[in-house]
Each structure stands twice: as structure tokens, then as C-alpha cells.
Image (cartoon, rainbow, N blue to C red):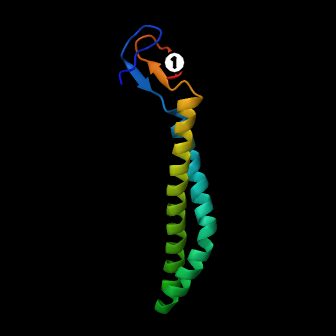
Amino acid sequence: MILLCPHCNSQEILALNYGRKTCGAIGTVAGSITGVSAATSGARAGAMLGSVAGPPGTLIGGLTGTLVGALIGGALGCTAGTELGSALDEQVLDNFECQSCGHKFSLEN
């Protein structure tokens, strides 16, 4: 599908994706925080498994459990955030900008 500017009929259109970028970043941070909070149980399990190797194993196991929880939470939060942001871009925001005349518009216009 070729997009044309409704103002000047130019084909030089840029998708801004502000909603997707912003919600993705917020979702990543929120998911990471939630993942770290939920990783407390993962850290305990990692520390318990690592205790077989002594005190260094307990420390490494606990840190690994926390890190994995944060990474998984961040990835899930980013995915959810970008989906929400994409919906905002498509239905609410003027997601496209003409590079010729600077006019911003959505597909609904």
C-alpha cells in the first residue's frame, strides 16, 4: 500500500511510531521491576541450588535468579508495551509525517 500525504500528495511519508516507542520503553522498565520483585523466589531457589558449591555458589545462584527474572520481566513488559503503543499509533495518534510539507496525519484521515 502506497501512502500519500493528504495535503500535498507526496509519497515521502515517515512513520513516527511515538506510541510504540514510548509504551515499549515504559513496559520494559515496568516489566523489569516486576521481574526483579518476582525474582525473589527465583533468587532463593538459585541460592539454594548454588549452596551446594558453598558461599560463592549461593551468591552467584541468587544473582543469576534475580537477573533472569529481570530479563524475562523486561522482555514481557516490552512486548506488551509495544503492542499497546502500536494500537495507540494506529487509532489515536497522527502516526505519519510527510517529509515534503511536514503535515502529520493518521490513516483514518
Give the image quarter of residue 93.
top right
Which amino acid is tagged 1? Lys
Image side of residue 9 versus residue 71, left or right: left
Q: Residue at 52% x, 44% y: name it.
A: 83
Q: Which quarter of the image is occupied by the N terminus?
A: top left
Q: Nearer the viewer, residue 89 or 64?
A: 89
Q: Residue at 55% x, 50% y: name it.
A: 80
Q: Is residue 80 above or below residue 46?
A: above
**Residue 39, percent from left and from top:** 59, 70
**SS at badge 1:** strand
**Residue 21, percent from left and from top:** 51, 39
- Is disc 1 surrounded by few (<14), some (14 to 19) or many (20+) residues within 10 Å? some
Q: Residue at 36% x, 16% y: name it.
A: 11
Image side of residue 14 versus residue 76, left or right: left
**Residue 37, percent from left and from top:** 64, 66
Image side of residue 23 versus residue 1, left or right: right
Q: Residue at 57% x, 34% y: name it.
A: 88
Residue lying at the far top of the rendered structure:
8
**Residue 42, percent from left and from top:** 56, 75
Q: Is residue 12 above or below residue 66?
A: above
Report the number of discs. Answer: 1
Q: Is residue 36 above or below residue 44?
A: above
Q: To which residue does mark 1 refer? A: 104
